[in-house]
Image (spheres, helix red, strand yellow):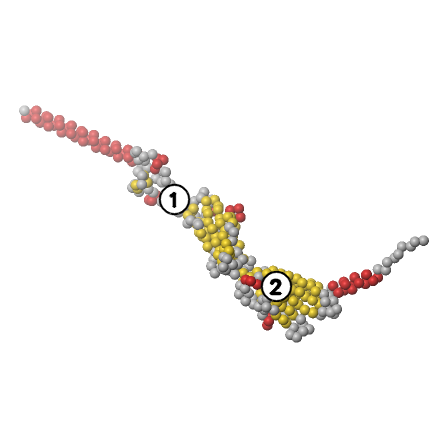
């Protein structure tokens, strides 16, 4: 009679337990690498880990990309070794952190920490983080292409430029401190200087001006340039509302009213009665407005004077004629 062969699973299970026991010896390896650092500053890189009581640390190695630049081996003398990939501050570096001083833009990249346990496991884990070295420009972003006055219905167009960045800056616009949605942006590609490697960022704006944009007759535009949390600068531009001025309603013979009002006068303030004037064919009339009723009154006065003169002349003629008849 055939009987199934029963496999002895004790040895595989024992191996799994040994592996599991070894694997928990080194755990919770964590690396802290600053996302961005200003050029010329120092960077502190941390590598945290946990070991079982029976295990010891064999070594900690730091890499920039694939190149090792720092090693800490507590069982060796000297325990610290520094290689030429980056400039390490020895006095501030140890088994848990390493300090890189006087950063240059060429040291941006991926940094990895490799932790190895001592015998018998020699268990090794590696964790990485990215760091970017920022070279901010010496000046704030500049706003160009805008006018000092706009009226509702005008199209507002302008550019915000931030020069000599590495990497290029992130630009945003606001109106009265309210962010403008990207729908009204005009994106430009960064312009790179082939000699310095620095880049210039440009962001345009194209928006229809509305009366609601003006607060007490003014509109505030702001362009902000940021890179991570290292650089944050902005520039502002104030625009005044161009309000229409109501012209005087005089009439002039031989001129059409449409011709008189063909040019609307605009000013930043409401018109004053004493400042109203009428422009006809390039000539400025008297600032005191005239009306049709006043002109009629003047004509009536002239007519009355004429009739009085006629009566006086008639009476004088009759008296002279009577005088001559009496003498004769």
Residue 110 visible in the current orientation: yes
Distance from disc 1 to disc 2, alpha carbons, whole Å, reads: 64 Å
Establish if 286 lies above or below 107. Answer: above
SS of the residue at dot 1?
strand
Q: Residue at x 57, y 63 (%)?
A: 107
Quarter of the figure with residue 109: bottom right
Residue at the limit of the structure toward the bottom, as seen here? 77
71 and 211: which is toward the camera: 71
Marks 1,2: beta carbons within 8 A: no
102 and 158: which is toward the camera: 102
Q: Which of the labelled discs sits on residue 132, or is there none?
A: none
- Residue under label 2: 64
Q: Which of the labelled discs sits on residue 266, or is there none?
A: 1
Give how far across and how far down residue 166 sits, in percent.
Answer: 53, 59
315 and 217: which is toward the camera: 217
Q: Earlier in the sequence, mark 1 or mark 2?
A: 2
54 and 304: which is toward the camera: 54
Image-based side of 214 in relation to 6, left or right: left
């Amino acid at each position: 009679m055939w009987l199934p062969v029963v496999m002895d699973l004790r040895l595989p299970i024992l191996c799994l337990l040994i592996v599991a026991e070894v694997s928990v010896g080194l755990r919770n390896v964590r690396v802290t690498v600053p996302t961005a650092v200003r050029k010329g500053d120092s960077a502190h890189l941390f590598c945290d880990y946990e070991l079982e009581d029976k295990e010891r640390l064999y070594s900690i190695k730091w890499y920039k990309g694939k190149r090792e630049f720092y090693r800490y081996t507590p069982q060796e003398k000297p325990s610290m070794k520094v290689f030429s990939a980056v400039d390490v501050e020895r006095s501030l570096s140890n088994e848990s952190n390493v300090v890189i001083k006087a950063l240059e833009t060429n040291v941006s990249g991926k940094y990895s920490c490799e932790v190895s346990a001592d015998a018998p496991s020699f268990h090794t884990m590696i964790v990485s983080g990215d760091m970017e070295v920022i070279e901010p420009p010496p000046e704030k972003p500049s706003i160009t292409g805008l006018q000092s006055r706009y009226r509702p219905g005008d199209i507002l167009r302008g550019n915000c430029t931030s020069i000599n960045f590495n990497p290029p800056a992130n630009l945003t616009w606001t109106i009265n401190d309210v962010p403008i949605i990207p729908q009204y942006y005009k994106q430009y590609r960064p312009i790179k200087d082939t000699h310095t490697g620095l880049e210039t960022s440009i962001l345009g704006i194209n928006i229809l001006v509305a009366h609601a944009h003006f607060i007490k007759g003014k509109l505030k535009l702001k362009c902000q340039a940021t890179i991570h949390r290292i650089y944050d600068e902005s520039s502002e531009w104030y625009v005044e509302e161009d309000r229409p001025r109501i012209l005087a309603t005089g009439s002039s013979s031989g001129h059409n009213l449409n011709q008189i009002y063909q040019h609307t006068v605009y000013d930043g303030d409401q018109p004053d009665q004493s400042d109203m004037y009428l422009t006809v064919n390039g000539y400025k009339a008297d600032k005191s407005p005239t009306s049709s009723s006043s002109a009629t009154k003047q004509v009536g006065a002239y007519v009355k004077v004429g009739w009085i003169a006629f009566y006086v002349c008639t009476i004088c003629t009759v008296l002279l004629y009577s005088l001559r008849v009496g003498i004769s």
